[in-house]
Amino acid sequence: MKQVGLVVIGRNEGQRLRQCLLSVIGKVAHIVYVDSGSTDGSVEMARSLGVEVVELDLSIPFTAARARNEGFAQLLQTNAQIEFVQFVDGDCEVVEGWLEHAQRELATSPSVAVVCGRRRERFPEQSIYNKLCDIEWDTPVGEATACGGDSMMRVAAFQQVEGFNPTLIAGEEPELCVRLRQQSWKILRLDAEMTLHDAQMTKFGQWWKRFLRSGHAYAEGSWLHGRSPERHWVKESRSIWLWGLVIPLLALGMAWPTRGWSLLLLLGYLLMTYRISSYLRQQGLVSKEAWLYALSCVVGKFPQLQGQMQFHFTRFLGQRSNLVEYKTAVPSAK
């Protein structure tokens, strides 16, 4: 496909990166791999497969947004005729047929800037945390407000909004989509298999960090675009503060003067869990998985609160937020 280029980003993805690259080599006009300081031989392995590599400047803080921007720039410098760019994370394998499907949709829908499909977890049974990721990836098809890290974008639209915000440590894709929609572009989620993702998430601490990062993303997203007509992530941020801080403080702080009656507020967590699980069961999710995901959403308010607080604290101090990573490195890519 002469019109399609591909940008892969990664850091110490090892064998996951090899699988990713092998799934796309020979299927697009050009591939650029952007490496964020790997020490596992990823750079050498990518070059051995004939893939162009961009090594990010170590003196500048890494972000996925910055990596994608630099990969995009290098891709267009190498081949200025490319019209569509598939972005993919190095821990994902692109499913056979997706690139053709996505390119065809963009070519026939001039108002669409981004298309994405179904990302699936490669090993959902490996841990409950992997299973939670797989459930999360299963989002409704049709016109959407945002995409994830794996998506195909129209070059002209990406250039019009000047790409990703390179300072964001998380939530860079939804933030980009806000700016795209402000320019009347559409984001479309297709009913098609797109990528296989390998979360390698087996510990509670990893789950906590992942939710902490999402809380940070909600906070920064609402700070940047909360005053826009759509109130980007304002509702989500308020919900985090309500359930993560306000209700626990009221329930515990008022326990003595109310002779314990205020503790009944904590029943709200059970009610919210039930409501989320009921909705998911109505959408076709089996009961066990619906309850698991609902519980994760409710308990996740607490690490998300930590993420919100970290963002506002670092902003108050005028500092830059540090990258939050939950994944562990895998064996060498050599």
Image: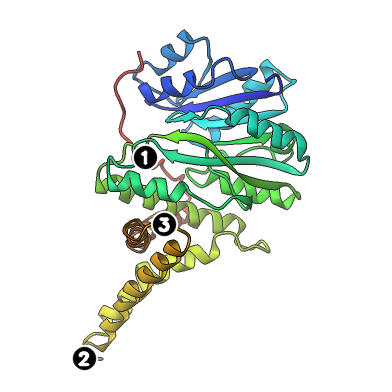
Q: How far apart are marks 2 and 1 (CA)?
A: 43 Å
When asked about the image quadrant of residue 80, the answer is: top right
Amino acid at pointer 2: Arg
Q: Quadrant of the C terminus?
A: top left
Q: Give how far across and how far down residue 304 sits, in percent.
A: 39, 57
Amino acid at pointer 1: Glu
Q: Which residue is at the front of the view, 108 or 166?
A: 108
Q: Mark 2 points at which residue?
A: 259
Q: Give how far across and how far down residue 195 sits, in percent.
A: 49, 34
In percent of the image, x 51 and y 47: which residue is there? 171
Q: Which of the numbered marks, if any, corresponds to residue 325?
A: 1
Q: Is mark 3 on a helix, strand or loop?
A: loop
Quick one: label 3, few (<14), some, or many (20+) residues within 10 Å?
some
Q: Mark 3 points at which residue?
A: 285
Which of discs 2 and 3 lies nearer the camera? The answer is: 3
Q: Earlier in the sequence, mark 2 or mark 1?
A: 2
